[in-house]
Amino acid sequence: MKNFRIIICIICILAPYPATASEKHNTESGTSDRKISISATSMKADYAGRKVRFEGSVEVTGRDLRLKCRTVQADYGEDGEVKTLSASGNVRFEYQELKATAGTAELDMKQHKIVLTENPVVTRKGIRIQGEVIILDLKDGELEVRRAKGVFHTSGP
Amino acid sequence: MSVHPDSLKKNINTTLVLLALYAASCSSVPDTQTDGAEKPEASFENLNLTFHSPDGQLKMTASAATGTSLKPSNFRNVELEIESGGKIPVRIQAGSARIADAGSWLIEDGVTVSHEFGRYMLELKCPSIILHPEHRSFICHEPRGVYYEMTKK
């Protein structure tokens, strides 16, 4: 029970990273001019299978976002909207003050959730937490850690 | 529905033969000697060349072409449109394109790719692209670009 309370405490500390009010406004009004840069060794577009796959030293950089990994695959539906975005291979992800590493990361565009698997580790403001699966909810600012292990780093005496 | 490479080539050849005949009637078609044998070559400038793949999912336009009079194979100033789901989400522009092998195309010289994903746009620049019409796919080498939400009109 004590461990459970500690985990809840960590989750509360890690939580505040939802989209800012201005970001939400821009997205809803459709007037956002934010651009995300992307580079890779190669990109394969499979327009029969409705997927686009970036491979080799993939780097994605946005205003508050930085992602490095080996591959990124976007799967899209008939309407052209991207459904899922999957990153794999030594995934290093930074969003605002939050940093995460994992073997794979999957972004659900509808749910606005990022699911980190394969030894995922999240750090923010000196707090490091790892677990079997870490789910970042970008909409509500919640973080769910399954089978969590956390470490607090205190500065000074 | 997939594009069979043979049918695509046939379609291209048919289109280009007609163009070659038209071009021969209004411009010069130089003959050159290669290895002692006469090998006619053709060069077509200022053309508005368009072809569609048999399934209608791929359209290419070019302003110039070179090759033999029966089989032009190099195109310049090309624009490709790839249709999917009644829309044209993919557009490719480049300085040159040529048939590489097994029905694939090598597209080079200042290649830009625009790929729509609903409200979002992916714009890439890359040195070259290999297009596989029969597989309905293409590979972009060393892509660099941006992904952004388009402004509502």
Image (spheres, grey):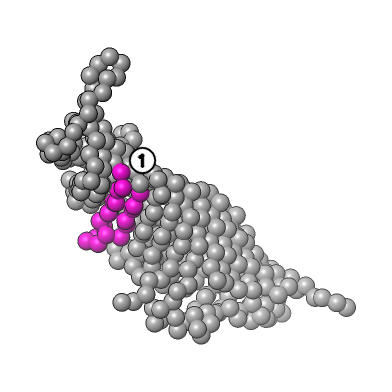
| Residue B88 horizontal/vertical position (percent) | 27, 59
Which residue lies at the image location 62% right of the left edge and 65% below the top edge?
A100
Near mark 1 (Cα within 10 A), the count class, few <14, some 14-19 or many ≥20, is: some
Which residue lies at the image location 67% right of the left edge and 69% below the top edge?
A123
Residue A74, compared with residue B51, is above or below; it is below
Looking at the image, residue B141 sits to the left or right of residue A15; the answer is left
Residue B57 or residue B125, whichever sits in front: B125
Mark 1 — residue?
A: B106
Quadrant where the C terminus of chain A sits is bottom right
Residue B105, compared with residue A125, is above or below; it is above
Whether residue A2 is visible to the viewer of this picture, yes or no, is yes
Quadrant where the N terminus of chain A sits is bottom right
- The range drawn in magenta is B76-94
Which residue lies at the image location 38% right of the left edge and 65% below the top edge?
B121
Residue flagged by tag 1: what amino acid is it? Answer: Leu
Residue B124 or residue A10, whichever sits in front: B124
